[in-house]
Amino acid sequence: MNLREHSRKMRQIEVLGINLLRLITVITAVPVIGIIIFILVRGLPAISWEFLTQMPRDGMRAGGIFPAIIGTVYLTLGTAIFSVPLGVAAGIYLAEYASDNVATRLIRIAIINLAGIPSVVYGLFGLGLFVLFLQLGTSILAASLTLSIMTLPVIISTTEEALRSVPNAFRVVSTSLGGTRWQTTWRITLPQAMPGVITGIILGLERAAGETAPILFTGAAFFLPRLPASPMDATMALPYHIFVISTSVPGMPLQIQYGTVLVLLVFVLGMNLLATLIRNRARSRRQW
Amino acid sequence: MNSKRTALNEILINSLIKIAGYSSIIFVGLILIFLVREGLPALEDVPFGDLFGSRWYPIEGYFGILPLISGSLLVTVGAILIAIPLGIGTAVFLSEFSPAWLRNFLKPIIEILAGLPSVVLGFLGIQIVAPFFRRFFDLPTGLTAFTGAVLLALISLPTIVSIAEDALNTVPPAYRQGALALGATNWQTAWGVTVPAARSGLLTALMLGIGRSIGETMAVMMVTGNAPVLPSGLNALFLPARTMTATIASEMGEVATGSPHYHVLFFIGIILFLISLVVNLTASSLTLRSRKRAERLLS
């Protein structure tokens, strides 16, 4: 009898506990869904061809956000130019070349630290090194360089992971046929790992596209009446533009604010979706 | 001839790859060097005692960073207190109790949260969260440390959930089977066996969540009300505050290069760098230790 009572009590605790955990999970997940739907609903009315392709007018209170969109595209591409070759090469080094020694462990510690450094500290670093010391000024170039160092850890770790998941048999066969380490990597291992590498690159660039703090003092412009003409120009960018119009422009129409947020969200989540699709497609097609 | 050129190419490419491999170390070094180069002169410009004073009012030459440090602490502690139960609870639910379809639905959603730019969350903080708290708690302004803490909790949740879930998943199934065979319920197994076995991974999740919160800039700057004052009690949570990150972001644009104010902002950058260094090293050593322990137990 006593035992049965005890087990009934345990059962009650279990049911209660699991329901509590369900509630907690709902509390965690609901804001995300809510945020997406809310911004869609409030932002969609602002979206029009003019909004996407026109210059801002009337102190940014009217017109479009074209320069901010273009600026974010430029910054993302600029970041890719520097961070993709460097990050992929570093990932290759860690997966295919490095042996497990003190130096390699130091590299790993460095990557972990790069990943953890606050974004605003990257901004300071970019200001100190690129803008002032190398005299690039506040420019697309300086901002892209700053962002690319910030995205390196993501690209390096995902590249390494993707390469490591390629079965060793591929390497063994290539080497036995006389392939050098580089030939094996470039012709055999890297192509096999490509979907994973591309997923990592997109996820890294997605983060760069949405960041504000690193470009605050390295390349972002409050307002530019024209498009940037060269990499040495400063530029408007979507994340910084959202910050500006939601904090520093009095009388800013709400619709434009939500519209701008929606455009950034589509940009960033679109990249996220693309990465997921590539990953899933590769997983279903993989033969090993 | 041809093979000679191939060999030369190979050497060239291999050394380029090696340099790329070591680039992370170089960049961490460069970041440290440039922070120190621009930040250390702060110690000459401002007496040490004043630098850690309790008044931040740069226009009149007061560079006491204590209010900023305590602002960061206040917001981060608040965020972690909210994020721990939610994050660990969600992770335990997803890994131990959730049906597979629900897990496959929820995990991408939490990944989306991780991908939301912080300026978007800051924007929603201004538009929705702050006005809500102002009415709910009947405050003069909704831009308070508490609002910042709530947003930061949201921002650090994906980190905590995904790392904690990974940690729970790596607990060997034999642990759970053993507990269930001894008659423990699922609930008892989860909290009595699986969670304790994953505790260093859970601690790692927590550390990285803290790191994420303390370094977060835009969202916090937008919703905490920008008031660099020393908290005087618990009610400080419902007053405006100002973190270290927000101070750098909002003031660096207006200072003259090389001025004391400029140096002090870089000095705050050094402090942030060191905090993230400690947090991340602790987190990675925790993971390393738990891996070694697992190997020992299962060998």
Image (cartoon, rainbow, N blue to C red):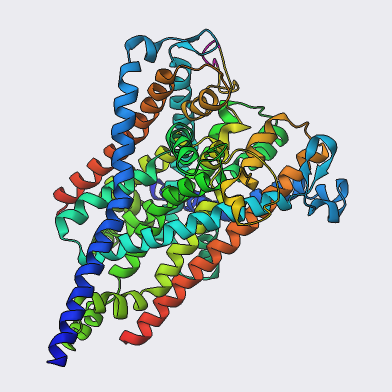
| B52 vs A153, nearest the viewer | B52
* Residue at position x 36%, y 63% in the image: B88
- Residue at the outermost front position: B138
Residue located 28% across and 41% down the image = A33
Q: Would residue B151 appear left or right of B163 to someone viewing this image?
A: right
Residue B227 point in image, percent of width and height: 66, 40
Residue positioned 45% across, 42% down in the render: B136
Nearest the viewer among B10 and B220 is B220
The image position of residue B152, as x and y in percent, is 48, 48
Residue A250 in the image: above or below residue A210: above
Say whether residue B234 is visible.
yes
Position of B260 with respect to B228 (left or right) is right
Q: Position of residue B15 (x, y in %)?
A: 51, 52
Q: In which quadrant of the rendered view does residue B194 lie?
A: bottom left
Kindly tell me whether residue B96 is visible in this rendering.
no
Residue shown at 35% from the left, 78% from the top: B197
Q: Which residues are magenta?
A: A225-229
Question: In the picture shown, does residue A52 fall above or below A182?
Answer: above
Residue in front for this viewpoint, A42 or A228: A42
Q: Main secondary structure of the magenta part?
A: loop
Q: Is residue A15 left or right of residue A160?
A: left
Q: Is residue A38 magenta?
A: no
Nearest the eye: A247 or A184: A247
Q: Position of residue B299 (x, y in %)?
A: 32, 87
For the image, the number of numbered tags is 0
